[in-house]
Image: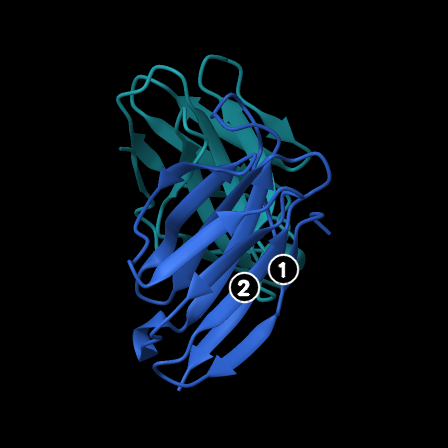
Amino acid sequence: AQTVTQSQPEMSVQEAETVTLSCTYDTSESDYYLFWYKQPPSRQMILVIRQEAYKQQNATENRFSVNFQKAAKSFSLKISDSQLGDAAMYFCGSSSTLGRLYFGRGTQLTVWP
Amino acid sequence: DSGVTQTPKHLITATGQRVTLRCSPRSGDLSVYWYQQSLDQGLQFLIQYYNGEERAKGNILERFSAQQFPDLHSELNLSSLELGDSALYFCASSVGSSGDGNTIYFGEGSWLTVV
């Protein structure tokens, strides 16, 4: 089994500033994938970014980037130039070889104007 | 729009009743996953089907069952409902069956309220 831990239940950031959400995971598998999903008030689960564990290069999607530290089993999400629309619950996830996603408890991000 | 369709969007039912939640995966996706999201339990994996076969089982209660049909749509059946079953039930889909980088896409969820 895999476990995913998000140690920050809540975070806040000023609009246009940068914020980093933390995530650690534990897995015994050698092949796995890591994801960040965003859940706005609509409750829709929206994929933000994904990272292949075998790749050393950190994934980037526009204003979203990750800091993947494989040895430390850390997978943090950095949001640059934060926008009001970024306000949401963010879930870190790890997929097993079976395909199922294990999720952390989530981090509620508030963006202040 | 993720392409994953779930019905109904909202459902209110009484304790002891049975309901069926329906899911149509994205076109071309063979895997279907069911997740339960409640306030105190976070996102819990229930079950996965791949091309009609059960692939993995998580924390799914015996009162719950699911299946995937030949046209790849899936149904989650919840019976003998209890107040604690009130939650948002997500269906998700992916192309393949394994964690080979297949991204899992989520539907909008079905809100179940048991009264």
Q: Which mark is residue B98?
A: none
Q: Are marks 2 and 1 in contact (CB under 8 Å)?
A: yes
Identify the residue shown where x is 63% and y is 42%.
B70
Identify the residue shown where x is 65% and y is 37%.
A63
**2 or 1: mark nearer the eye:** 2
Task: Give the colouring mode of the picture.
Answer: by chain
The disc labelled 2 sits on which kind of residue?
Answer: Leu
Q: Which mark is residue B21?
A: 2
Using the image as rendered, state which of residue A13 and residue B97 is in the foreground: B97
Query: Residue B109's quadrant in the figure?
Result: bottom right
Residue A21 coordinates in the image, percent (x, y): 43, 43
User: Could you tell me which chain the residue with mark 1 belongs to?
Assistant: B
Asked if badges 2 and 1 are on one and the same chain, I answer yes
Position of B41 relative to B52 (above/below): below
Name the tint of chain A in the rendering: cyan
Upstream in sequence: badge 2 or badge 1: 1
Mark 1 = which residue? B6
Q: How dense is the environment of label 2, judged by Cα within 10 Å: few (below 14), some, or many (20 and up)? A: many
Chain colored blue: B
Say whether residue A2 is left or right of residue A63.
left
Say whether residue B86 is left or right of residue B53.
left
Using the image as rendered, state which of residue B16 and residue A52 is in the foreground: B16
Identify the residue shown where x is 40% and y is 73%.
B86
Query: Residue B8's quadrant in the figure?
Result: bottom right
What is the secondary structure assignment of the residue under circle 2? strand
User: Could you tell me which chain the residue with mark 2 belongs to?
Assistant: B
Identify the residue shown where x is 50% and y is 13%.
A55
Position of B89 relative to A59 (above/below): below
The disc labelled 1 sits on which kind of residue?
Answer: Gln
